[in-house]
């Protein structure tokens, strides 16, 4: 499980990158973390996510997340890929 994307907070003109990945993806996640470390807004967050499968049974995932600081450079990409 992974989810990466750009987000804009209300009232701001800048965008930031949000990365959430399953603990299973630790090597790649920490590669990205080290790559963006100078721009990271906050420390790592551990999240437990519960998602129902097709039979309605909840499956639990342990995830980690970080966000980088908001940057005007990312607004171009936000506007290009998000409506």
Image: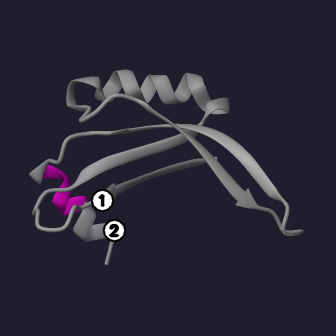
68 on left or right of 21: left
Q: Residue at x 33, y 71 (%)?
A: 82
Q: Residue furthest bottom?
A: 83
Q: Which residue is mark 2?
A: 81
Q: Residue at x 49, y 43 (%)?
A: 20
23 on left or right of 56: left
| Image quarter (top left, top right, bottom left or bottom right) of the C terminus | bottom left
Q: Which residue is mark 1?
A: 7
| Tag 1 near tag 2, CB within 8 Å | no
Q: Mostly what secondary structure, the magenta segment?
A: helix
Q: Quadrant of residue 58?
A: bottom right
28 on left or right of 68: right
Q: Position of residue 64 (x, y in %)?
A: 51, 35
Q: Position of residue 43 (x, y in %)?
A: 34, 28
Q: Position of residue 61 (x, y in %)?
A: 69, 43
Q: Position of residue 31 (x, y in %)?
A: 45, 23
Between 26 and 78, the one lying in front of the other is 26
Mark 1–mark 2 distance (CA, rounded to whole Å)? 11 Å
Who comes first in sequence, dot 1 or dot 2?
Answer: 1
Mark 1 is surrounded, within 10 Å at the Cα level, by few (under 14), some (14 to 19) or many (20 or more) other residues, namely: some
**Residue 55's disc number:** none
Q: Nearer the viewer, mark 1 or mark 2?
A: 1
Can you say whether 61 is above or below 64 in the image?
below
In magenta segment, residue 27 = no
> For numbered disc 2, what is the local secondary structure?
helix
Q: Residue at x 23, y 62 (%)?
A: 8
> For numbered disc 1, what is the local secondary structure?
strand
Q: Quadrant of residue 68?
A: top left
Mark 2 is surrounded, within 10 Å at the Cα level, by few (under 14), some (14 to 19) or many (20 or more) other residues, namely: few
Q: Residue at x 29, y 24 (%)?
A: 37
Q: Which residues are magenta?
A: 73-77
């Amino acid at each position: 499980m992974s989810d990466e994307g750009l987000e804009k907070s209300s009232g701001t003109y800048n965008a930031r990158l949000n990365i959430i990945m399953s603990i299973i993806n630790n090597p790649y996640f920490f590669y990205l973390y080290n790559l963006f470390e100078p721009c990271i807004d906050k420390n790592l967050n551990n999240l437990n996510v519960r998602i129902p499968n097709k039979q309605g049974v909840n499956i639990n995932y342990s995830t980690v997340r970080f966000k980088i600081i908001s940057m005007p450079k990312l607004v171009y990409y936000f506007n290009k890929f998000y409506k």
